[in-house]
Every structure is written in structure tokens, then in C-alpha cells.
Image: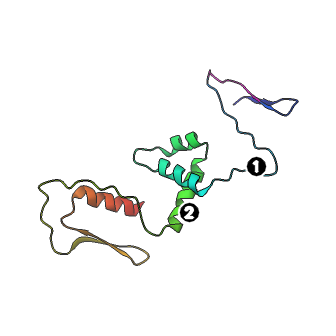
């Protein structure tokens, strides 16, 4: 980005290839932005929603992708173990439930997640993906 410091101390930005470049100038002793917990949550939800691209969200909110991943890691450490869930109607022709779980996943903290045999393959795959992320 081509920008020069004028004698008055203002930044003057120029156009590169017809595209307007944005420049954020911080003045004073504090040179870093402080993101509220609500802002962080909003950015994380946008960045990790289905179909989202973290780089695109980072550009939209003018934040580093590394910071988004750092916030996600911090949120996981503070998490109490709940995750967003989307409930969909059950398809017809579902097989009858079998007694006992088919898959039991034991987590590092000692808790267990059981997935029954009657669960659709799509739901079981989604649950396992959620545990891995």
C-alpha cells in the first residue's frame, strides 16, 4: 500500500490498481485494539459458521487470522462443554433403535459420549467431527 506521512502528521493514502486501500491509524499510548468478549464471540461465530472462510471474516472485521484462531483456542479452554446444535426433523424409515450404544468415545477429561446404533450416519459423523474440532 502506498501511503506517505504529510507534514501535518496525517496519513495520505493512494489508490493501487483502482482499488481503495484502508489504513487504520492508532494514536496515543495504547496502540492495540481491545476487543470486547461480545465482539470476539461475534467474530468467532462468523468465522466458524458452516461455509465460512476465516480469511474472509478476518478481512471483514479487520483482524488477523492468527488472532481469530488464538481466540478460538482460548474459548475452548474456557468452555464448559456445550456446543451449538441444529435439530432437524427425523427422516422416515429410520431403523429401530438397538439396545446399548454402538460407539462410545471417551474424552481426555474422563467424560464419555455414546452414539446409539439407531442414529443416522449423518448425525453420527457430525457428532464425531464436533468432538474432533
Decide: is 56 above or below 104: above
Decide: few, some or many residues near mark 2? Use Cα within 10 Å; few <14, some 14-19, many ≥20.
Answer: few
Q: Residue at x 70, y 39 (%)?
A: 24
For the C terminus, the image quarter is bottom left
Q: Quadrant of the N terminus?
A: top right
Which of 1 and 61 lies nearest the eye of the viewer? 61
Say which residue appears at 46% left-offset and 51% top-offset: 48
**Residue at far right of view:** 7
Secondary structure found at label 1: loop
* On screen, residue 110 above or below 71: below
**Which residue corresponds to the image point at 42% horizontal and 65% vertical from the top-left?**
82
Frontmost residue, 64 versus 10: 10
Q: Residue 42, relative to residue 4: is it above or below?
A: below
Tell which circle, 2 or 1, labels the residue nearer the N-terminal end. 1
Report the magenta residues as a range. Answer: 12-18
Whether residue 108 appears in magenta in the rendering, the answer is no
Image spot of residue 25 (x, y percent): 74, 40
Residue 93 percent coordinates (x, y): 11, 55
Image coordinates of residue 92 in percent, x first then y, are: 13, 54
Neighbor class of circle 1 (other Cα within 10 Å; few <14, some 14-19, many 20+) is: few
15 or 38: which is nearer to us? 38
Residue 62 at x, y = what percent?
61, 42
In three-dimensional space, the C-alpha distance between marks 2 and 1, rounded to whole angstroms, equals 22 Å
Is 72 on the left-hand or right-hand side of 34? left
Question: Which dot marks residue 31?
Answer: 1
From the image, tell me which residue sits under label 2.
74
Majority secondary structure of magenta residues: loop
Q: Number of numbered discs present?
A: 2
Q: Quadrant of residue 102?
A: bottom left
Q: Is residue 88 left or right of residue 44?
A: left
Q: How is the image coloured?
A: rainbow
Amino acid at each position: 500500500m502506498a501511503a506517505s506521512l504529510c507534514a501535518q502528521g496525517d496519513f495520505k493514502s493512494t489508490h493501487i490498481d483502482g482499488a481503495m486501500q484502508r489504513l487504520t491509524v492508532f494514536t496515543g499510548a495504547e496502540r492495540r485494539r481491545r476487543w470486547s468478549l461480545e465482539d470476539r464471540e461475534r467474530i468467532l461465530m462468523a468465522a466458524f459458521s458452516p461455509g465460512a472462510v476465516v480469511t474472509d471474516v478476518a478481512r471483514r472485521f479487520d483482524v488477523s487470522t492468527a488472532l481469530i484462531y488464538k481466540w478460538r483456542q482460548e474459548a475452548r479452554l474456557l468452555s464448559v462443554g456445550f456446543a451449538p446444535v441444529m435439530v432437524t426433523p427425523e427422516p422416515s424409515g429410520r431403523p429401530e433403535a438397538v439396545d446399548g450404544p454402538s460407539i462410545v468415545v471417551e474424552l481426555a477429561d474422563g467424560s464419555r459420549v455414546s452414539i446409539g446404533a439407531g442414529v443416522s450416519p449423518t448425525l453420527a459423523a457430525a457428532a464425531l467431527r464436533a468432538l474432533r474440532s
